[in-house]
Amino acid sequence: MSRTTSPPRLTLLTLATGVATFAMLQALVNPVLPTLQHDLNTSQSTVTWVITAWLLSASVATPLLGRIGDMIGKERALLVALAAIALGCLIAAVAPNVGVLITGRVVQGFGGAVFPVSFGIVRDEFPAARVPSMIGVLSAVIAGGNGVGIVIAGPIVEALGWRGMFWLPTILAVATVVLAHRYVPRSPVRSPGRINWAAAALLSGWLVTLLVPLSKATSWGWGSAAVLAPLAAAVVLFAAWIAVELRSRDPLIDMRMMRLPAVWTTNFVALLYGAGMFASFAFLPQFMQIPPAVAGYGFGSSVTEAGLLMLPMLVTMAVASSVSGLVSRVLGLKTQLVGGCAFGALSSAGIVFYHDRPWQLAAEAGAIGLGLGLAYAAMTNLIVQSVPADQTAVAGGMNTNIRTIGGSIGTAVLSSVIAGHLRPDGLPYESGFTTGFLVLTATLAATVAVSLLVPAARRQTASGAEPGVRITAATEAR
């Protein structure tokens, strides 16, 4: 279709619908894990893979489809990602066992490319002066989608069963495919090349060999060969992946670009922040559902009640993301990122020491939302402003990807910690949650220190480049 026939508002609406659908899937299953464990007759460590497998899939697919989008057109990559979401949700909705459900979640994970591809389309289609605000809008939608997923999971499950929670994103994804075909213009910026399948295979390999032993370490034993051997393999595969990427003419991830100070520091923050925040999403609702009469802690909340206790996070995420453009103009992106990381660390510390009353967790969830809204928008804008236009999707994809990898690691580690503190009746001891969230607090505190290393964003010209600086993938210093 002609690039002149797509009103910008409809393009933005289409992108917002797509990212909201995938964001909702990030959080939709979190409050329902105990229900899935019971209904599918599986263990806690296995049901956690409903989250971990999705994160792993997204970790691999996001940079791959981001690269494909830069090559053949971001609008085409967007359609592929949306179709994957719809197909994966359909598989999950009809899954007869946990294995098929996990397979459906793997397919859903390929939809992770909607984030970087959408950010790339925004950079292509909107004036440079409006890009930070539009990214703030999409970040608000992403934050809101996460919160909505947590809040609506309970009512959907109670009304339709857990299978029903996958039908809504199926419908939304199909509708967005139609909208994207009509209202998302062809990409004006493309980067010809080839797909480095060896790099993609090595990326998949080191992620799998890292995450599987981390999630199973408690049951297999941290010092066992079953844990140590794959971890050693992960180190070797990671080194091989870096070597292949550095020597490739068409790298999946341009390591020269990754060495830009603003890029590597922001990605390091994303790794640590993702570990803390994804794990909080996964296990805070579970804590709320623990029956106090049996375990001596928790609130015995239903899935719906656990979702409602997380409602303050939805509100504060949406507010923080919506005003992130104004905050960055007044305080700068670096200050915004530091503040978002600080809110995350404080909220996690609060959960460790104050979790005896529902209002305490509601307040801490609100602080989590503030941190997410500010930090996610700042990270995305820092990356978008630091790379050339033809690398926007792959660079944004890698930032999202690193955040997702962090989430995979954080979820696997926290699952292992909690699984190592189980009572004879199968419920975790309270110390399992407090120890786990103490680890997350230390991780999020580290994000504050790392975010201080991020170079302050420089003023941009109308073209999106810094005055007097020619941005190339080989730029080593700014």
Image: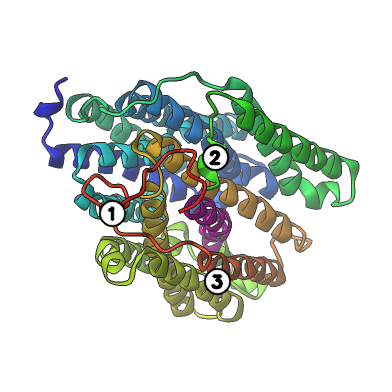
From the viewer's perspective, is residue 304 above or below residue 448?
Answer: above
Specify the amino acid type for callout 2.
Arg
Residue contact between numbered discs 2 and 1, judged by CB atoms under 8 Å: no
> Closest to the observer: 396 or 31?
396
From the viewer's perspective, is residue 46 above or below residue 343?
Answer: above
In terms of image quadrants, where is residue 190?
top left
Q: Magenta segment: does it hold 262?
A: yes
In terms of image quadrants, where is residue 9?
top left
Local SS, label 2: helix
Specify the amino acid type for callout 1.
Gln
Which quadrant is home to the C terminus?
Answer: bottom left
The magenta segment is 260-285
Write down the residue under mark 1: 460
> Closest to the observer: 263 or 5?
263
From the viewer's perspective, is residue 34 above or below residue 326?
Answer: above
Choose the circle earlier in sequence order: 2 or 3. Answer: 2
Is residue 142 rendered to the left or right of residue 264?
left
Write down the residue under mark 3: 348
Specify the amino acid type for callout 3.
Ser
Q: CA distance from mark 1 to mark 3?
A: 35 Å
Is residue 337 rendered to the left or right of residue 101?
left
Residue contact between numbered discs 2 and 3, judged by CB atoms under 8 Å: no
Local SS, label 1: loop
Which of the numbered marks, if any, corresponds to residue 256?
Answer: 2
Q: Where does the image place residue 258, in percent across and percent down from the top left? A: 53, 44
Q: Nearer the viewer, mark 2 or mark 3?
A: 2
